[in-house]
Image (cartoon, rainbow, N blue to C red):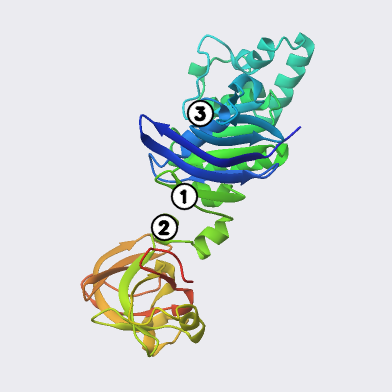
Amino acid sequence: MMAGVRLVGVWKEFEGVVAVRDMNLEVRDGEFMILLGPSGCGKTTTLRMIAGLEEPTRGKVYIGEDLVADSEKGVFVPPKDRDIAMVFQSYALYPHMTVYDNMAFPLKLRKVPKKEIDQRVREVAELLGLMELLRRKPRELSGGQRQRVALGRAIIRKPKVFLMDEPLSNLDAKLRVKMRAELKKLQRHLGVTTIYVTHDQVEAMTMGDRIAVINGGILQQVGTPEEVYNRPSNTFVAGFIGTPPMNFLEGTLLDDGRVDFGDFHLRLTAGQLELASGYTGKTLTLGIRPEDIYDVDISPVHDEENTIRGRVDILENLGNEKIVHVSLGGYSLTASLPPESRVEEGSEVGLVVNIKRAHLFNEHGEALF
């Protein structure tokens, strides 16, 4: 039986330091939820409170309909009674046991009959492609194989919820890409509610049904990968999601609909201007992603009022794209251009800003659009 997870007003303090602040989050039954944020933001602490490895200072935690932690009522259900399974960054396999015995161990602890253990080990081994490795010991396995065994040991218990704390971070880049796809496919197959902690926004974007972005212990935004990418709620989310990161330009909104950046201007659309009404004369931050800035010579968008010129300081040729760092006035802009662009380092370049794809943030960093 699966279950969703709900955190209601959850706080966690360590010796007066607030690690998680007023966390309200609902993870749906069967959902793959990503907790994303920089190191030290509180995502692992949140996961550990769901697991029962940390007790909330304040607030409530539910797994399904069961209240497993409530600071006011003094409720705290220990980890072994929460019907969850955790997969950590370190594989934590028993080195003296075979793959078979490592996977069977959780069931042996629960005194499951030997015949059923054998059946379930083989079912999970088949699912994870481990059948040929059952008699090997961890030292005889690659990193990816060991991670599969750790996953198998979690799956075999048939828990209500999987909790994963950066399980792929010890793998090399190529294997991480492969394991991302395998993990997502596995979660779809099992349909088990999964909460996955990572600081890698590519992992978050490619794997999650929804992403919970956390910074400084505070939940910044929850949404699908498309929502957090295309409609970030604030400058932190906008800057954290996307590679290369979003460009931010600080300027003043003029009464004629232009934003003044000193050495150049950009003109907002009528719809954007309506959303920014009331901010005329105020300092705002305009955000534009590198892929929404085009080389004027091959631009799919023609917009003279939003064409600017600058000097190419650095050009990174990645084959499928060219990342150019352009200085103009007191700003440095990053643009992601197609390989056919003929820009060169040290040369002047005309850039068209696709203003329809721009974001505008107020003085508190909150998105206006």
Q: Is residue 302 something one can see in this rendering?
A: yes
Distance from disc 2 to disc 3, alpha carbons, whole Å, reads: 26 Å
* SS for callout 2: loop
Q: Amino acid at mark 3?
A: Phe
346 or 180, which is in the foreground? 180
Q: Residues within 10 Å of mark 1 (few under 14, many from 20)?
A: many
Circles 1, 2 touching at the beta carbon (< 8 Å): yes
98 or 309, which is in the foreground? 309
Quadrant containing the N terminus is top right
For the point 50% across and 46% down, the residue is: 203
16 or 52, which is in the foreground? 16
Q: Amino acid at mark 1?
A: Gln
Horizontal arrangement in the rendering, residue 216 relative to residue 116 (left or right): left
Q: On the image, numbered disc 2 is attached to which residue?
A: 243
- 12 in relation to 273, above or below: above
Circles 1, 3 touching at the beta carbon (< 8 Å): no
Q: On the image, numbered disc 3 is attached to which residue?
A: 88
Q: Position of residue 148 (x, y in %)?
A: 58, 28
Q: Amino acid at mark 2?
A: Thr
Name the N-terminal-most of marks 1 and 2: 1
Circles 2, 3 touching at the beta carbon (< 8 Å): no
